[in-house]
């Protein structure tokens, strides 16, 4: 699977990096950073492209929330599931939530939509989003660049790890079943 993602990212270039950062982010940007270390891309341009995609993505989601409000969550119930959690975090931490939202699994896309449904000014969100996205782009692509060998190793050995994990799960499951059967 990762091989396919690598080939897709290499084939789509910086446009693919931008779109991946716009939509989701972390996995693709770590992979892009790793590919930059291997010479497929320039690290500087990967980080800049990741920033642009992430920044404009969150601005898009913010304005989606601003114009369509909670109707977005009614239309897309899968992301609406996390809206309550994002709203609670925003109410509790406000500025800190906006700065760290993109680092939180489960509320990455929902967060800016929820912020858009509040009375937080678009100017405040723009600046906080810019700061957050700069830190995110440099950090995530930098991790991929710094640990490119580890990423390559995982990509090359993912199938062996999957087989080992399945074997462990089956062994533990059978052991538990035998234990329960014997106990009865």
Image (cartoon, rainbow, N blue to C red):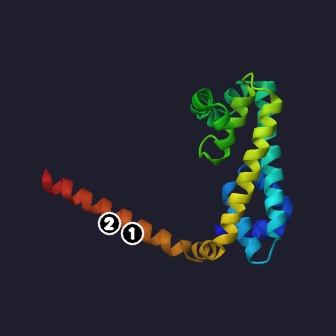
Q: Are marks 2 and 1 in contact (CB under 8 Å)?
A: yes
What is the quadrant of residue 77 in the picture?
Answer: top right
Residue 24 position within the rendered picture, expressed as x and y whole percent measured from the top left:
71, 50
Residue 53 position within the rendered picture, expressed as x and y whole percent measured from the top left:
81, 51
Question: SS class of the residue under badge 1?
Answer: helix
Residue 122 position within the rendered picture, expressed as x and y whole percent measured from the top left:
82, 30
Give the residue at x 74% y 66%: 32
Residue 22 position within the rendered picture, expressed as x and y whole percent measured from the top left:
78, 49
Question: SS class of the residue under badge 2?
Answer: helix
Residue 154 left/right relative to 15: left
- In the picture of the structure, the residue carrying the numbered disc 2 is 171
162, 136: nearer the viewer = 136
Q: Is residue 108 something that shows in the picture? A: no
Give the residue at x 65% y 41%: 101
| Residue 176, numbered circle | none
Q: Quick one: quadrant of the N terminus?
A: bottom right
Q: Give above or below for 23 relative to 111.
A: below
Tell which residue pokes out farthest to the top in this image. Answer: 119
What is the quadrant of residue 170 in the picture?
Answer: bottom left
Q: Give above or below for 39 relative to 99.
A: below
- In the picture of the structure, the residue carrying the numbered disc 1 is 167
Residue 12 left/right relative to 25: right
113, 140: nearer the viewer = 140
For marks 2 and 1, give the CA distance: 6 Å
Give the residue at x 19% y 58%: 179
Residue 110 left/right relative to 183: right
Q: Give above or below for 38 relative to 15.
A: below
């Amino acid at each position: 699977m990762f091989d396919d993602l690598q080939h897709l990212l290499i084939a789509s270039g910086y446009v693919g990096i931008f779109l991946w950062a716009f939509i989701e982010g972390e996995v693709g940007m770590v992979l892009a950073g790793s590919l930059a270390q291997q010479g497929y891309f320039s690290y500087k341009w990967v980080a800049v492209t990741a920033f642009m995609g992430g920044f404009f993505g969150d601005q898009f989601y913010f304005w989606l929330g601003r114009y369509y409000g909670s109707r977005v969550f009614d239309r897309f119930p899968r992301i609406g599931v996390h809206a309550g959690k994002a709203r609670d975090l925003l109410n509790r931490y406000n500025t800190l939530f906006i700065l760290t939202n993109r680092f939180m699994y489960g509320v990455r896309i929902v967060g800016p939509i929820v912020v858009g449904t509040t009375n937080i000014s678009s100017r405040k969100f723009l600046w906080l989003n810019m700061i957050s996205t700069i830190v995110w782009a440099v950090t995530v692509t930098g991790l991929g660049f710094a640990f490119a060998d580890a990423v390559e190793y995982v990509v090359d050995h993912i199938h062996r790890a999957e087989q080992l994990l399945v074997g462990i799960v089956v062994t533990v499951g059978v052991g538990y079943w035998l234990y329960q059967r014997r106990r009865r």
